[in-house]
């Protein structure tokens, strides 16, 4: 992404840490948030979780469930089944949706001018696309490091206020190293590819993608043997670079010997720009697991708590998670490929507990029997349900903010709380819940 974007991310990370420190030591830091004690430990919730070690879906059932997700029109696709060409009309609504720079927005603290907006618009290179009724040939690529997925081919952030550094409108998601992408288009300045990934369309820096043949690509689209990152994160080293992998990332496994794994790591050849691979031995590590973890309620809780205390990562930035990527990363360690956004996650298939027409007492009764580890949704936010303690429901979630006495309070971290915090509409989280879904 270039030195400027990494510098900006470091600044953001530093500011986030300062913000969290101020919050933790301020007098108004309660309001439903559990700051310490046994409720902030996964072991407490696992011990309370009856039958939490029972497998909810086995490997074959998870494959069928992933098929249900793809058939539910939730923007999730099976990468290995992608055709060799894609109709322009399939991604045209995505690539032309430049909402991130509509209205008044700020870049580097200064209002973005109409001339600057026009330059960004031109960089989309839309005139180079075939007509809407035609198709583009898929080019194949593999990410060689964690790649930021942008809704514009732009490294700098666009913000709603001149002071904001946390909520970049351009930032959509992050894709882990070693992921297959279908390259569909290129920006005018040739610095970005427009790609299809398994749960999104978006712009990725060309430097983060290594073009390859379809045969090479299929190893990543349909891996036969792999390690899953089950820790909060993990680092590998290839071609002189320390490569970051977030929970849920997969590493191609070649062989296992005693206390070591041999993996195949992708990188971009400095001369040709094409995909190259290096065989590397890794020590057996508790942060890696051969194949997916068993999908149990306890496993969901244990994985979620590995993010406890992490900085809130808007759109997957700052090498961390926002509310939906927390849920996505946790469940991906068990082989479930979920939609990226909360607007789609709320429509997931499974055992759905619809809370919309329930009063407060009915909602509490419904939560009494909801399986711990199930995601709870409200408009614009998703959480992981932990269970009840003394009649009070608790959640773990990557939280940006809540309201208290009509005032917005930023927290920006992964935390444990009850459901009594307020939203902007003056109602509690409990009263704003739409549904809870057990993926089964």
Image (cartoon, grey):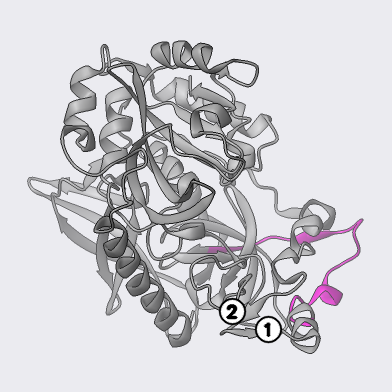
Q: Residue 204: which disc?
A: none
**Extreme left residue here?**
258
Residue 120 found in image quarter? bottom right
Q: Residue at x 73, y 83 (%)?
A: 188
Task: Inspect this view and state whether residue 83 appears.
Answer: yes
Where residue 406 appears, as percent x and y from the top left, is 54, 48
Q: Secondary structure at mark 2?
A: loop
Q: Is disc 1 surrounded by few (<14), some (14 to 19) or many (20+) residues within 10 Å?
A: some
Is 276 one of the magenta-colored residues? Answer: no
Q: Earlier in the sequence, mark 1 or mark 2?
A: 1
Residue 162 found in image quarter? bottom right
Task: Inspect this view and state whether residue 216 appears.
Answer: no
Q: Is residue 93 left or right of residue 20?
A: right
Where residue 154 appears, as percent x and y from the top left, is 62, 77
Q: Is residue 4 left or right of residue 104?
A: left
Q: Residue at x 38, y 20 (%)?
A: 58
Q: Residue 111: which disc?
A: 1
Q: Which residues are magenta?
A: 122-141
Is 123 one of the magenta-colored residues? Answer: yes
**Is 212 in front, or is 158?**
158
Q: Secondary structure at mark 1?
A: strand
Where residue 249 appears, as percent x and y from the top left, is 37, 51
Residue 311 found in image quarter? bottom left
Q: Which residue is mark 2?
A: 162
In the displayed structure, 194 sits above or below 375; it is below
In the displayed structure, 161 sits above or below 431; it is below
Mark 1 vs 2: CB contact within 8 A: yes
Where residue 198 appears, as percent x and y from the top left, is 57, 48
């Amino acid at each position: 992404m270039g030195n400027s974007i990494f510098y900006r991310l470091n600044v953001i990370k530093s500011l986030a840490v300062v913000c969290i420190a101020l919050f933790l030591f301020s007098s108004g830091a309660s309001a439903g948030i559990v700051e310490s004690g046994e409720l902030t430990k996964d072991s407490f919730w696992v011990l309370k979780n009856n039958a939490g070690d029972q497998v909810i879906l086995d490997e074959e059932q998870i494959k069928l469930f992933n098929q249900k997700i793809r058939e539910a029109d939730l923007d999730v696709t099976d990468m290995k089944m992608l055709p060799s060409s894609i109709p322009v009309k399939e991604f045209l609504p995505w690539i032309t949706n430049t909402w991130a720079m509509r209205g008044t927005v700020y870049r580097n603290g200064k209002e973005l001018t109409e001339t600057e907006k026009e330059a960004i618009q031109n960089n989309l290179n839309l005139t180079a696309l075939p007509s809407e009724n035609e198709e583009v040939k898929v080019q194949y690529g593999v990410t060689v490091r964690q790649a930021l997925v942008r809704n514009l081919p732009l490294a700098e952030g666009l913000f709603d206020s001149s002071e904001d550094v946390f909520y970049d409108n351009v930032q959509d998601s992050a894709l882990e190293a070693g992921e297959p992408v279908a390259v569909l288009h290129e920006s005018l300045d040739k610095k970005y590819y427009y790609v299809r990934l398994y749960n999104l369309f978006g712009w990725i820096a060309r430097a983060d993608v290594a073009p390859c043949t379809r045969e090479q690509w299929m190893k990543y689209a349909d891996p036969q043997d792999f390690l899953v990152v089950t820790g909060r994160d993990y680092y590998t080293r290839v071609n002189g670079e320390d490569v970051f992998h977030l929970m849920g990332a997969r590493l191609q496994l070649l062989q296992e010997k005693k206390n070591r794994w041999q993996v195949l790591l992708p990188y971009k050849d400095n001369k040709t720009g094409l995909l190259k691979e290096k065989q590397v031995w890794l020590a057996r590590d508790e942060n890696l697991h051969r194949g997916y973890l068993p999908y149990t309620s306890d496993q969901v809780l244990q994985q979620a708590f590995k993010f406890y205390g992490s900085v809130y990562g808007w759109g997957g930035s700052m090498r961390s998670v926002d509310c939906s990527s927390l849920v996505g990363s946790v469940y991906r360690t068990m082989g479930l490929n979920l939609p990226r956004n909360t607007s789609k996650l709320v429509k997931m298939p499974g055992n759905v507990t619809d809370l919309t027409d329930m009063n407060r007492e009915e909602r509490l009764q419904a939560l009494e029997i909801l399986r711990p580890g199930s995601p709870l949704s409200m408009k614009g936010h998703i959480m992981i349900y932990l269970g009840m303690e003394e009649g009070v429901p608790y959640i773990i979630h990557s939280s940006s903010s809540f309201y208290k006495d009509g005032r917005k309070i930023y927290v920006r971290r992964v935390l444990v709380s009850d459901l009594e915090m307020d939203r902007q509409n003056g109602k509690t989280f409990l009263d704003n819940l739409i549904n809870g879904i057990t993926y089964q």
